[in-house]
C-alpha cells in the first residue's frame, strides 16, 4: 500500500478529482484552502500572496497509485499558466 499526497493550485479545480475517479481510486480526501510556501512560491490567499492550493490524500494499492501518478505526470505537460501540481508518494505499513 502507498499514500498519495497531491498539492494542486490552479484554475481547474476538478482536475485532480477527475483523474482520481477515472483511474479508479476508491477513496480520497480533499483539504481545501491550503496555504503555505514552497518551490513555486508563497500562496496565502491574500493580495500580497494570492492563490491557494488544494491537498488530496489517498491510500491504495501500489498499482493504483502508480496509475494516478502517471496520469498526473501527463497533465503537467498540459499545465495552464499559473497552475501548480506537486505529488508525493509514501509507503504505508498499515491502514485500517
Image (cartoon, rainbow, N blue to C red):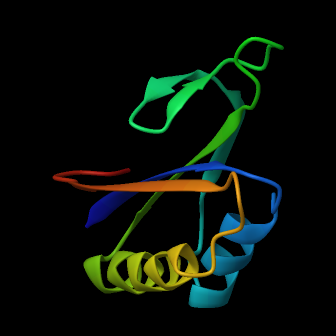
Q: Tell me: 12 left or right of 78.
A: right
Q: For the N terminus, which image quadrant?
A: bottom left
Viewer-proximal residue, 60 or 54?
54
Q: Position of residue 8 (x, y in %)?
A: 61, 51
Which of the 4 image quadrants contains residue 3? bottom left
Decide: is 32 above or below 43.
below
Which of the 4 image quadrants contains residue 51? top right
Question: Which residue is rendered at x = 53% and y = 57% of the image?
Answer: 85
Viewer-proximal residue, 56 or 44?
44
Question: Which residue is rendered at x = 60% and y = 64% of the image?
Answer: 27
Question: Which residue is rendered at x = 57% and y = 87% of the image?
Answer: 23
Q: Position of residue 28 (x, y in %)?
A: 60, 58
Decide: is 87 above or below 77.
above
Viewer-proximal residue, 65 or 12?
12
Question: Which residue is rendered at x = 71% and y = 67% of the image?
Answer: 80
Q: Position of residue 11 (x, y in %)?
A: 83, 55
Decide: is 65 above or below 12.
below
| Figure label count | 0
Amino acid at each position: 500500500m502507498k499514500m498519495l499526497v497531491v498539492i494542486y493550485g490552479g484554475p481547474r479545480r476538478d482536475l485532480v478529482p477527475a483523474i482520481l475517479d477515472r483511474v479508479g481510486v476508491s477513496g480520497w480526501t480533499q483539504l481545501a484552502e491550503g496555504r503555505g510556501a514552497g518551490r513555486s512560491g508563497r500562496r496565502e490567499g491574500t493580495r500580497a500572496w494570492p492563490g491557494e492550493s488544494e491537498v488530496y490524500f489517498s491510500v491504495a494499492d501500489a498499482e493504483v497509485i502508480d496509475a494516478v501518478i502517471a496520469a498526473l505526470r501527463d497533465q503537467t505537460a498540459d499545465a495552464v499558466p499559473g497552475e501548480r501540481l506537486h505529488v508525493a508518494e509514501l509507503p504505508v505499513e498499515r491502514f485500517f
